[in-house]
Amino acid sequence: MGVPSDEVVQIQHPDAAGDPTVVTVSCSDKTGLGCDLCRVVLLFGLNILKGDMSTDGRWCYIVLWVVPRRRGLRPMAWDLLKERLVELCPAAALFGLDSSYLEPDGLAPATPQVFLLKFCCFDRMGLLHDVTRVLCEMELTIRRVKVSTTPDGKVMDLFFITDARELLHTKNRREEAYERLQSVLGGSVTSCEIDSATEDMSSCLQASASLSPIVLEQMFDIDVIEGQLSRSRSNSSLSVTMDNSLSPVHTLIQIQCVDHKGLLYDIMRTLKDCSIQISYGRFYAGQKGRCELDLFAVQSDGKKILDQQKQRTLCSRLRMELLRPLRVALVDRGPDMELLVANPVEVSGKGRPLVFYDITLALKNLQKRIFLAEIGRHVVDDREWEVYRVHLGEHDQELSCSARSKIVDGVMNMLMGWD
């Protein structure tokens, strides 16, 4: 973790209610820092209205104008946000030193300890979301989950979690978790335990079933997805272009698109995964949901993006990530309906935050009970995806096309911030 500093990250609150808060980060640079910062901002439920970033390859300066977006959680914890942002900054920035002296390139962060949360209680509408909300508020990250409901209405839930505060091994932290969970589980809870996950439990962290051909086609076939997107209004509002004539050393990437939750994170993670480095960038979100970005970029070798095929590939990848950053499908599985949501995993191994939170909130709003649920990772066409599978129960088998579309649209709108 980083060392707390008042200089590396500064948060300036507005004078007038409703105006954005200004978050400033000034530190030594590292690969993917912009992506990591945007991910934390998304995790804390903030919407980025405007952003400026610049770097000379050694020192970076980033300014973000943000407003709270997420509803339903506790009031914004600005001090905690600052602490998490400071932790992302290279240690050299915290001491005013050259990062090469303190952080060897490619040094992997320590793997967080995994714990197993297991509880049993009687089911009710929205229970899974209420538990997920408590875990999010406590900074307990859900790595995997297995949820099952018995015919008599009891649930057995297994959550594999990590603690951002690295305190879940302590008695006080666990008692806090038990107390918070008790408040939402109510008197029907029969057991609630938190233990360290052992190697014998590792099999539970893997996806239990492969994806069917129909799911692979609906969610990952590029031709099918592009056919769906060609009828979308967002597609007509999207423009991704590259220009090498305006700078002698940089390629200008210009993007115009419709805003959605986590937009800047989706752009930055895509560029990070494609080994594209941003030297200077400016982002602006208009009041009518239109966004504009100008990014002066280079390849990992410090040169402009001159190869035409690389330009086409990168533009195509950005277009896909902006129009369909997550994939949602509703399919038949025996007597049940199964909702699937695919979340792209960064090359670093991190997935988009709060996806399970949004899924369970959308289903709670739609008054849909969750009978089974699990999270697993799958590799499709050399890309890793975090796939959320939710069984909605056999009584939903005869849903009309309009009712099915309402579920898919409700979940997608929640994920994209269009609710």
Image: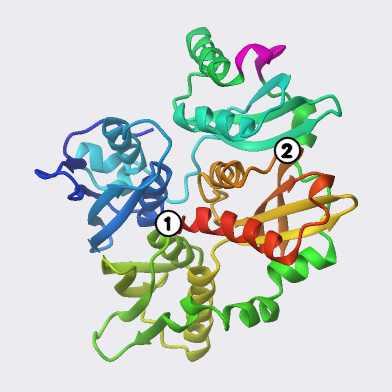
Residue wearing tag 2: 205
Q: Quadrant of residue 248?
A: bottom left
Number of marks in the rendered image:
2
Q: Position of residue 175 (x, y in %)?
A: 52, 10
Q: Is residue 137 magenta?
A: no
Mark positioned earlier in the residue sequence (1 or 2): 2
Number of residues whose C-alpha sits closer than 10 Å to that of mark 1, classed few (under 14), some (14–19) or many (20 or more): many
Q: Label 1, secondary structure: give it.
A: loop
Q: Give 22 or 302, whichever is nearer the viewer.
A: 22
Q: Position of residue 132 (x, y in %)?
A: 56, 33
Above or below, 152 relative to 263: above
Disc 1 to disc 2, C-alpha distance: 26 Å
Position of 55 compared to 185: left or right?
Answer: left
Taking the spot 79% from the left edge, 52% from the top edge, the residue there is 337
Mark 1 belongs to which amino acid?
A: Gly
| Visual colour scheme | rainbow
Residue wearing tag 1: 262
| Residue 39 seen in this snapshot | yes
Q: Position of residue 116 (x, y in %)?
A: 67, 24
Q: Of all residues shown, which one is farthest toward the left?
A: 15
Taking the spot 62% from the left edge, 80% from the top edge, the residue there is 226
Query: Range of the magenta residues?
Result: 186-195
Q: Give 311 or 173, whichever is nearer the viewer.
A: 173
Taking the spot 40% from the left edge, 48% from the top edge, the residue there is 42
User: Which quarter of the image is occupied by the N terminus?
Assistant: top left
Q: Give 130 or 160, whichever is nearer the viewer.
A: 130
Position of 224 compared to 34: left or right?
Answer: right
Number of residues whose C-alpha sits closer than 10 Å to that of mark 2, classed few (under 14), some (14–19) or many (20 or more): some
Mark 2 belongs to which amino acid?
A: Leu
